[in-house]
Image: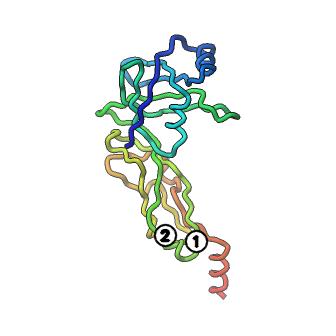
Amino acid sequence: MKTFDLKGTVRKGTGKKAAKAVRTEGEVPCVLYGGSETVHFQTKSSGIRKLLYTPDIYLINLDIDGKVVSAIVKETQFHPVKDVVLHADFLEVKADEPIVISVPVQLEGLAEGVKAGGKLSLEKRKLKVKGLYKHVPERLVVNVESLGLGKTIQVGRLLFDNLTLLDAKNAVVCAVKLTRAARGAAASAAK
């Protein structure tokens, strides 16, 4: 997993007024959970944007007033119109405790159904997994070479070493859909 360095300072106050004051300074109010105590801190908006506006997942080296901890992004809140980060929650990572994180899916190979005229469609861009952070990959690679026309790959068919998939077993990860051209060719072949 890639790493990302983020610096922050402990917040003096909590609540709506304090959070609004932090945002007017161009910073984002944040909370770190999972340690011996919950830490309320703030970080620069520009630094957190580089972390959040990417499809990659990171193990964050979080430096709060000189104390460095490893963490992952647990949840973020965005402004509904301006697309500005309003708040971020982080979870401290420990080597012996499993974490739950959404990992991007990467499709690999040329599907049989695509060769027959279908269109490959990625239905779930990320899958929620549970495992020790050292076992969590940057991407979950799904091989689609044997996927035929009109067929799907569901979460229940996937297995990854040392990881538990938490999405519904019948959720479709990817599918090869029939195109109009493929339907026309199948109809003319049936005549």
Q: 96 or 58: nearer the eye?
A: 58
User: Residue, x 51% and y 46% (percent of image)?
Assistant: 55
Residue 63 place in picture, x, y as percent: 40, 24
User: Residue, x 39% and y 38% (percent of image)?
Assistant: 3
Residue 16 place in picture, x, y as percent: 62, 16
Amino acid type, callout 1: Gly
* 125 sits to left or right of 38: right
Query: Please, what secondary structure does the residue beneath circle 1 have?
Result: loop
> Looking at this rendering, what residue extends furthest in the left direction?
96
Label 1 sits on residue: 118
Residue 157 place in picture, x, y as percent: 43, 58
Amino acid type, callout 2: Ala
> Looking at this rendering, what residue extends furthest in the top direction?
12
Label 2 sits on residue: 111
User: Residue, x 61% and y 16% (percent of image)?
Assistant: 21
Q: 112 or 61: nearer the eye?
A: 61
Residue contact at pointers 2 and 1, CB within 8 angstroms: yes
Query: Please, what secondary structure does the residue beneath circle 2 have?
Result: loop
Q: 152 or 106: nearer the eye?
A: 106
Q: Earlier in the sequence, mark 2 or mark 1?
A: 2
- Quarter of the image with the C terminus in it: bottom right
Question: How packed is label 1: few (under 14 Cα within 10 Å), some, or many (20 or more)?
Answer: many
Question: How packed is label 2: few (under 14 Cα within 10 Å), some, or many (20 or more)?
Answer: many
User: Residue, x 63% and y 20% (percent of image)?
Assistant: 24
- Quarter of the image with the N terminus in it: top left
Residue 32 found in image quarter: top left
Placement of 42 over or under 183, stated as above or below: above
> Looking at this rendering, what residue extends furthest in the bottom direction?
191
